[in-house]
Image (cartoon, rainbow, N blue to C red):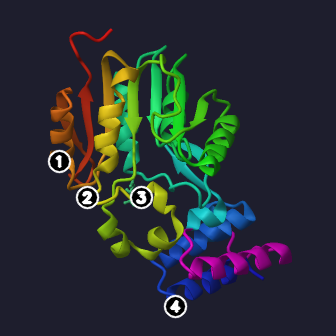
Amino acid sequence: MKYEILYRYGAEQLRQANIPEADLDARLLLEAVCHTDRNALLVHGDRGVERGQEEQYREWIETRKSHVPLQYITGSQEFMGLPFQVSEHVLIPRQDTEILVEEVMRELHDGMTVLDMCTGSGCILLSLLHYSNHCRGVGVDISKEALQIARENAASLSLEAVFTESDLFAGLEENVKFDILVSNPPYIASSEIPGLMEEVRCHEPLIALDGKEDGLYFYRRISREAKPFFYRGASLYFEIGWDQGEAVSLILEQEGYREIQVVKDFAGLDRVVKCIFWEENHV
Ligand code: GLN
């Protein structure tokens, strides 16, 4: 079948199933199947698609119709200009999270040690390591399956990082210390989960989204339990939900952190909170 006709079929199927961005998803799925890019549709629409690829495409369209996110079908998502492998065991890297990485990069110097708490696919830690020199990175997650993906991402990007299975800090060696702690923890209040779009609610890992009662559970625990793992003057960076800037700042203030700042994303919404760890008697 001709490329363009197959594309039209896919787009129509997705439209009928009320998939948001039906045309875009139909095109991206076809490109992933045929290893083509945008030009294929623009200038080579009448090229033929092999039978096997056509079958694969029809299958993927069916899967997308049941609201499985595009990235879980193709198995990848770009983040900070780098390709990351994803599966249903990890949150799909969000563009908003690039703000978090960019904030860390302002302070990240060669040779620093970075801890990424709740690392998931590893996209935050691995981007930081890719764009710096001689930094030591540790990624922690409670999910074995997520860590497997993170390790594969490190390998395919030729980066070295340590990925540790641990319930927050419980499994970390006692005397390792870090210059930077970055985290995009689960932060959706449990009561808000039923209102999320089907793609997120039914397919992304709940364990990566659910911030318990008020969505702030992990900010409280991380800011309290991180202290023994900081060098004095270390920086802490959290991604937050748009309405959590004040509440997370207050938690950090109560835990004694300094220079607490909220950073907005491109939509003008609160997205990151950063601060400094400084206790007089801490070495
Ligand atoms: N930003 C994500 C979402 O809107 C949530 C990420 C998280 O809980 N860390 O689905």
Picture quarter containing residue 106? top left
Q: Is residue 34 above or below residue 233?
A: below
Indicate the secondary structure of the residue bearing disc 3.
loop
Quote the CA–CA distance across marks 2 and 1.
10 Å
Type of the residue with mark 2: Asp
Towards the viewer: 29 or 142: 142
The residue stretch that appears in magenta: 44-69
Assess disc 4: are there few (<14), some (14-19) or many (≥20) residues with their C-alpha within 10 Å of its C-alpha: few
Indicate the secondary structure of the residue bearing disc 2.
loop
Quote the CA–CA distance across marks 2 and 3.
12 Å
Q: Are marks 1 and 3 in contact (CB under 8 Å)?
A: no
- State whether label 3 is within 8 Å of ligand 1: yes
Disc 2: which residue: 214
The answer to whether residue 207 is visible is yes
Quote the CA–CA distance across marks 1 and 3.
18 Å
How far across and down, in percent of the image, does residue 27 sit? 59, 71
On whether residue 53 falls in the magenta region, the answer is: yes
Q: Are marks 2 and 1 in contact (CB under 8 Å)?
A: yes
Disc 3: which residue: 209
205 relative to 274 in the view: left or right: right
Disc 1: which residue: 247
How far across and down, in percent of the image, does residue 90 sit? 55, 54
The answer to whether residue 42 is visible is no
